[in-house]
Amino acid sequence: MHLYLSSRSPLHAVYTNEDGQVMYKVETTYGLGNRTSTISCVVPHDIPRKITTSARKPAAPPVERESTSESGGEEGGRKHGSVDGSRAARDGGRSSGEAEVDEAEAREEVDMRDRFALLAQIEHKTVTSSIMRFGGDEVETKTYFKKKGWGWYGRNRVFTAPDGREYKWLLKMFTSELILYDPHEKTKTHVAKFHPRSLGIIRKAHPAYLEIFPAGEHMVETILITFIYIEKLRKDKERASRSSGGGP
């Protein structure tokens, strides 16, 4: 499974699948030295949505009718603001058929837009532990992740997934990679890997994408949430290393 990014940065991108369908969106804001990443998942289109009055065309002013006589005259002398006037105000002077067509067009236009629901938030902190919020829980990253082994940019991170198994994010030179953590296994079980954007100079050109192997397809959202934290951590360490003259 591939999740393609709309930009080169995992922290500011829309994620789509191989069919071009939008799946997730990540937005990161800045404030007082810290950043907050908001991860949203797309809401399926088969879930109905209520059309608000803002999606309808504005109604025309009420159509006033003059009575034919002082006493009421024709049709019992309906006065301004009668039932006919109210109907005209509601339909904007259009026929009922035209009003139904406009409402259908408004519904189709609204349904074509992607809707998102909050999946998780990550407060990236520089001094104290970062905070992750998802599934109704709030947890500090120093509690959620354990440091195991060494990567190119410091200690790798191990976490326990909802399936009860442990997984390890590897902080590599140019990317982050997730494997099943089992210190007794000699072979690695690949779970996910981030592929940065390629301009086609050395390798075939492709957008940035997060590759999820079969071993991780049952926990895509857990992978995405932890990946956003890990890649931010790795990139910060990469920038720090370059500024000190020690980067690749």
Image: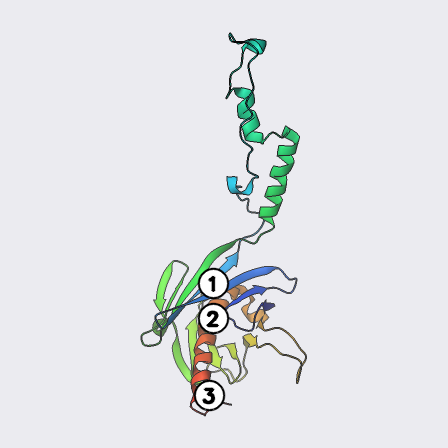
* Number of other residues with Cα within 10 Å of mark 1, as a class: few under 14, some 14 to 19, many 20 or more: many
| Residue at point 41%, 59% (across, down) | 135
Picture disc at residue 242: 3
Mark 1 lies on residue? 39
Picture disc at residue 228: 2
Instruction: Determine the residue located farthest toward the left in the rendered image.
Output: 128
Please report contact status of discs 2 and 1: CB closer than 8 Å, yes or no.
yes
| Residue at point 59%, 69% (across, down) | 214
- Expressed as whole percent of the image width and height from the top left, the position of residue 7 reads 56, 70
- As shown in the figure, which amino acid type bears the numbered disc 3? Arg
Looking at the image, residue 78 lies above or below residue 38: above
Picture disc at residue 116: none
Judged from the image, the secondary structure of the residue bearing numbered disc 1 is strand
Q: Quarter holding the N terminus?
A: bottom right
Front disc: 3 or 1: 3
Count of numbered marks: 3
